[in-house]
Amino acid sequence: MSKHLLLVEDNTADLELARLALEASEVQCDLSVARDGQEALDLLRGAGVLPDLVLLDLNMPRVSGHEVLAAVKGDATLQHVPVVVFTTSDEARDRTRARSAGADGYVLKPQHFEELIAALNELGQRWLTPGRPA
């Protein structure tokens, strides 16, 4: 059974770069995309099958990544889904808030394409390796 990644990203350029990097990486998974926090929550709450990993941007319109994280980790049906914050914010308060809300990881978005591929490979090995329990 193929692993499933939900990427929550509102920036079109970052989204396309992530898609290209995912294709160039060793990660094999099905990809779903939510363009803002509200869309992410709608997808998660309506999902027949939950993703194996959520990569979550923090700074988004409508519902922020912090709000999405709190909602996911506060929902008994969703709280087991791993959520890794994937953001440009290196602010200590964002890291602390994400950790306190139950984030399973915090990764700064790499500046260069090759670094993005490497980061996705690491995340894939950790969370999306076939045979890893859901």
Image (spheres, helix red, strand yellow):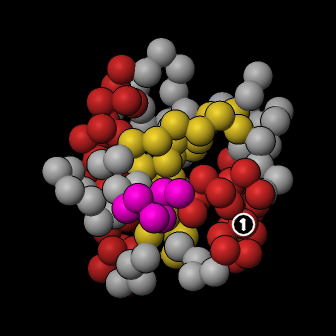
Q: Is residue 22 above or below residue 3?
A: below
Question: Does residue 74 show up?
Answer: no
125 to the left or right of 91: right
Badge 1 crowding class, 10 Å Cα cut-off, few under 14, some 14 to 19, many 20 or more, is: many
The answer to which image quadrant residue 41 occupies is top left
Q: Which residue is mark 1?
A: 117
Quadrant housing the C terminus: top right
Which residue is more in the foreground, 4 or 17? 17
36 to the left or right of 112: left
Q: Which residue is depicted at the point 53% across and 57% down?
A: 16
Q: Which residue is depicted at the point 72% across and 43% down?
A: 128
Q: Is residue 86 magenta?
A: no
86 to the left or right of 126: left
Q: Is residue 45 above or below residue 101?
A: above
Q: Which residue is depicted at the point 41% across and 59% down?
A: 12
Element on which disc 1 rests: helix
Q: What segment carries the magenta color?
A: 11-16
Query: Which secondary structure is most common in the magenta stretch?
Result: helix
Quadrant housing the N terminus: top right
Residue at far left of view: 62
Q: Is residue 117 above or below residue 3?
A: below
Residue at far top of view: 48
Q: Is residue 14 magenta?
A: yes
Q: Which residue is depicted at the point 77% across and 49% down?
A: 27
- The three-letter code of the residue at mark 1 reads Ile
Q: Position of residue 92 (x, y in %)?
A: 36, 84
Total number of numbered discs in the rendering:
1
69 to the left or right of 80: left
Q: Position of residue 72 (x, y in %)?
A: 35, 40
The answer to which image quadrant residue 46 occupies is top left
